[in-house]
Amino acid sequence: MRKVGAKLILTLLCLVLLRASALAGEVCLSVAASLKDVINELSDSFARQNVGIKFLKNYGGSGALARQIENGAPADIFISANLEWMDYLQNKRLMDSASIGIFTYNTLVFVGAADKKVGSMRDLPKLEKIAIGSPKSVPAGQYALEALKKAGIDKQLEKKLVMAKDVRECLMYAERAEVDGAFVYKTDAIQAKQAKILFVVPEDLYPQVTYPMGLTLTGAQNKDAEAFYKHLQGEDARAVLEKYGFPRK
């Protein structure tokens, strides 16, 4: 009898612990650095409305995030700053293809101190240091490099480019005046305190900045991740995107 009683208590305890674990749901997010403010606000409000859900957030360059997911880093939702890295994970069969859609868009701009006499791409060769995201892993850097090539000034700037790990680091360099200017997204520039938008990069020089989002294969099995993913497609998300300067089509 004692053994039966002890076994019953142990079983009940396990069920309680499992129930507690289920209530304390975790959602792992891997998101392009330029969306940090948007996702922080949306995840915080969602967590307040859904007690017990915990978000683990990983922000950075889209390429770096994709590589981390490929190497086994936990991720339920991935939002990239270009189509390439979403396609990369999809080809690796790590994404739930049916869930992939477009979250938002952006525009590339060049920022720096207001006293810099820079008004277009043709003025850039006059500068000494220009920050861009590392093109191998940062979509903003890829967009910027393509714009430089199409403008025919990439060779003149080869030794003047300062590589950053993500677009937020580019902005930081410009804010601290550690560079003469930086290529960042318009939404990042809006948040800047010191650096100013010196010019908008002509949109015919680079592909449209597109943010695809999707559930990973593990995320598709996580009901809390699915619920938050639906939230990202709703009116609350639309309002927050607009608040931070992102268009929602």
Image (cartoon, rainbow, N blue to C red):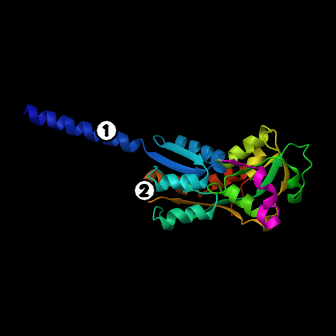
Residue 189 placement (x, y as % from top left): 77, 47
3D distance between C-alphas at marks 1 and 2: 22 Å
Residue 75 placement (x, y as % from top left): 48, 51
Residue that label 1 marks = 17
Task: Please identify, in this view, whether the residue under mark 1 or under mark 2 is nearer the observer.
Answer: 2
Q: Amino acid at mark 1?
A: Leu
Where is residue 121, by image quadrant?
bottom right
The magenta region covers 148-164
| On screen, residue 60 above or below 212 | above
Going 54% across and 40% down the picture, which residue do you hit? 48
Residue that label 2 marks = 218
- Which of disc 2 and disc 1 is earlier in sequence? 1
In the image: residue 124, left or right of residue 240: right
Going 15% across and 33% down the picture, which residue do you hit? 6
Going 79% across and 67% down the picture, which residue do you hit? 150
Going 77% across and 64% down the picture, which residue do you hit? 149
Residue 111 placement (x, y as % from top left): 81, 48
Q: Amino acid at mark 2?
A: Thr
